[in-house]
């Protein structure tokens, strides 16, 4: 009541013995008295259906969720509280992003965003103007905008000319616009209306610091007047505790939120900008990828029949069945076979240990590179067997894999972990030995379309290394997208694939394709 927030419906789900969040989301989607949907969730009952319903909802109304249980401790607490399998936080982040849900990190944030959505028009872009009477506060707000992905816009020359006509000579006429500490309500009103008229401005953050001559209630009055008539969102931060209480009360009386810090105003502006993009985003269903599913089924069924739950390089045929290019590769059971295979493939070659017990071959000396002749192969084979037995004496070794040595590409990783709530969670990142250290990866819930695959690739921090930096030839990103789509199809076709990893996928320069160099997967019984 104090801040004038009203609820059309307030529902507590309890342990969801019968009805769950998905049922109520369908109701709220068509409820004319509901403009914004806000939810606290500990888990969802049916992840895929939740995503499907949320996509439909967010085309029409913003949906904000606080999801608890994002840490291991919190996940255990969720499970003991409601009996809900928490699922991974990465899966929830991916599912929310793919279905248009805006995630808030706290109940306070959820209410901030809800008030913004129920008060303001959506911005047309992410270009923000800042109006302030305190330079330091303006700079902090500009920093917050930049760090969160909002653009501090440049003004039209006409805007700067108009500001110069009325603002003091010592004022700041660019962005942030500083009307100085003695600014009158009329000066605030004039500057704000000039900024609203600038086509380069999509949204405005107004900062008011109570200084000796600041008439906070009168400024709040003119802010209310402009906000009510503006077709652009104008978010307010009247800072100063009890000294701005009268101004804050006036804003609240008109249903206008006052954000207690500029960072909260910036976060709410970002939520508005994000939803503006979400609302117009088209979701296209994934295209069914061509594959020899019978060959793939036979490989998986044979492994289950032989009670083999972990498969390594020997399952490269599974990738070929889905049209994923694999490196030329042969298995050998002993040294003489290894030398013979090397001669047939042609030097230089790579030799890798085959063992269902070894996930990270490099760590135990299980990979030997750039072998140029039979002498190199013999020396590498003997050293490898000795090293592996030293590091993992109980590992079951079934032989070695000999592959053609491939150079000139970038190593990436494509993986999947089957989340208990949302199903196959795909992962992409820089591959090889770096993935464990950089942990620079992105996630998406399968099935995905080509736009989602592109987003997975471009959202990692090391994307410039793949796209080409400082004159480097770009990697074949189309080939990565194609591989992600085929892996998405594979893990959807076979629900008993629990974990899956191509590492590395060697990506060649643009137009030259890619090659899967190594694979590891884990199965469960049907």
Image: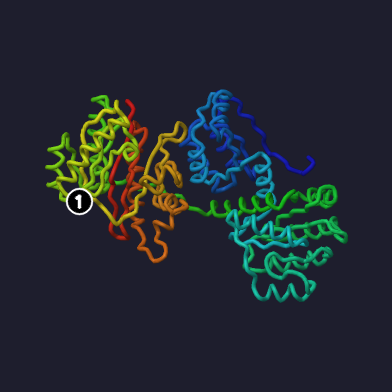
**Residue 162 seen:** yes
What is the x, y in percent for residue 105?
61, 41
- Relative vertical location of residue 241 with respect to residue 123 in this rendering, above or below: above
Is 387 left, or right, of 121 in this rendering?
left
The residue sitting at 14% across, 43% down in the picture is: 341
**Residue 11 sits in which quadrant?**
top right
Is 205 left, or right, of 417 in this rendering?
right
**Residue 205 sits in which quadrant?**
bottom right
Task: Categorize mark 1 by other alpha carbons within 10 Å: few (<14), some (14-19), many (20+).
Answer: some
Decide which of 151, 61 is in the foreground and name it. Answer: 151
Q: Quadrant of the C terminus?
A: top left
What is the x, y in percent for residue 101?
55, 44
Q: What residue did someone put label 1 on?
A: 348
What is the x, y in percent for residue 525?
32, 25
Q: How is the image coloured?
A: rainbow
Q: Secondary structure at mark 1?
A: loop
What is the x, y in percent for residue 5?
73, 42
Is 157 left, or right, of 435 in this rendering?
right
Q: Quadrant of the N terminus?
A: top right
The residue sitting at 58% across, 42% down in the picture is: 30
Decide which of 53, 435 is in the foreground and name it. Answer: 435
The residue sitting at 36% across, 49% down in the picture is: 412
The residue sitting at 22% across, 33% down in the picture is: 298
**Residue 293 seen:** no
Q: How many marks can you see?
A: 1
Decide which of 480, 72 is in the foreground and name it. Answer: 72
């Amino acid at each position: 009541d104090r801040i004038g927030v009203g609820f059309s419906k307030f529902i507590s789900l309890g342990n969801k013995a019968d009805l769950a969040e998905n049922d109520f989301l369908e109701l709220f989607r068509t409820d004319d008295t509901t403009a914004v949907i806000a939810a606290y969730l500990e888990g969802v009952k049916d992840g895929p259906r939740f995503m499907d319903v949320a996509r439909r909802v967010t085309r029409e109304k913003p949906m904000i969720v606080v999801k608890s249980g994002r840490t291991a401790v919190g996940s255990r607490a969720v499970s003991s509280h409601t009996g809900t399998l928490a699922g991974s936080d990465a899966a929830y982040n991916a599912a929310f992003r793919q279905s248009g849900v805006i995630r808030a990190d706290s109940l306070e944030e959820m209410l901030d965003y809800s008030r913004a959505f129920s008060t303001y028009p959506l911005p047309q872009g992410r270009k923000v103007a800042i109006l302030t009477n305190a330079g330091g506060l303006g700079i902090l707000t500009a920093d917050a905008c930049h760090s969160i992905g909002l653009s501090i816009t440049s003004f039209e020359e006409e805007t700067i000319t108009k500001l110069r006509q009325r603002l003091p000579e010592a004022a700041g006429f660019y962005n942030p616009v500083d009307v100085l500490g003695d600014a009158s309500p009329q000066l605030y009103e004039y500057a704000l209306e000039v900024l609203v008229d600038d086509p380069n401005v999509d949204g405005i953050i107004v900062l008011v610091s109570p200084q000796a001559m600041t008439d906070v209630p009168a400024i709040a009055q003119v802010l209310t007047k402009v906000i009510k008539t503006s077709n652009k969102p104008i978010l307010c931060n009247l800072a100063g505790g009890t000294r701005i209480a009268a101004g804050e009360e006036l804003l609240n009386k008109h249903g206008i939120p006052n954000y207690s810090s500029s960072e909260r105003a910036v976060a709410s502006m970002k939520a508005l900008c994000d939803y503006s993009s979400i609302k117009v985003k088209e979701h296209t269903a994934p295209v069914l990828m061509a594959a020899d599913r019978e060959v793939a089924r036979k490989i998986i069924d044979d492994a289950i029949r032989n009670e083999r739950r972990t498969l390594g390089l020997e399952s490269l045929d599974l990738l070929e069945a889905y049209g994923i290019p694999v490196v030329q590769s042969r298995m050998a059971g002993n040294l003489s076979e290894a030398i013979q295979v090397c001669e047939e493939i042609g030097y230089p070659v790579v030799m890798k240990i085959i063992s269902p017990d070894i996930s990270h071959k490099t760590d135990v000396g299980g990979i030997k590179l750039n072998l140029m002749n039979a002498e190199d192969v013999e020396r590498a084979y003997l050293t490898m067997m000795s090293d592996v037995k030293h590091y993992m004496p109980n590992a079951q070794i079934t032989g070695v894999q000999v592959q053609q040595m491939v150079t000139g590409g970038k190593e990436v990783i494509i993986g999947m972990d089957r989340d208990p709530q949302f199903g196959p969670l795909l992962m992409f990142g820089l591959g090889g030995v770096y993935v464990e250290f950089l942990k620079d990866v992105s996630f998406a819930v399968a099935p995905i379309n080509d736009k989602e695959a592109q987003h997975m690739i471009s959202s990692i921090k090391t994307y410039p290394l793949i796209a080409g930096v400082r004159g480097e030839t770009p990697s074949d990103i189309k080939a990565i997208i194609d591989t992600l789509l085929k892996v998405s199809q594979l893990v959807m076709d076979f629900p008993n694939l629990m974990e899956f990893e191509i590492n590395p996928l060697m990506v060649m320069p643009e137009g030259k394709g890619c090659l899967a160099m190594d694979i590891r997967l884990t199965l469960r019984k049907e």
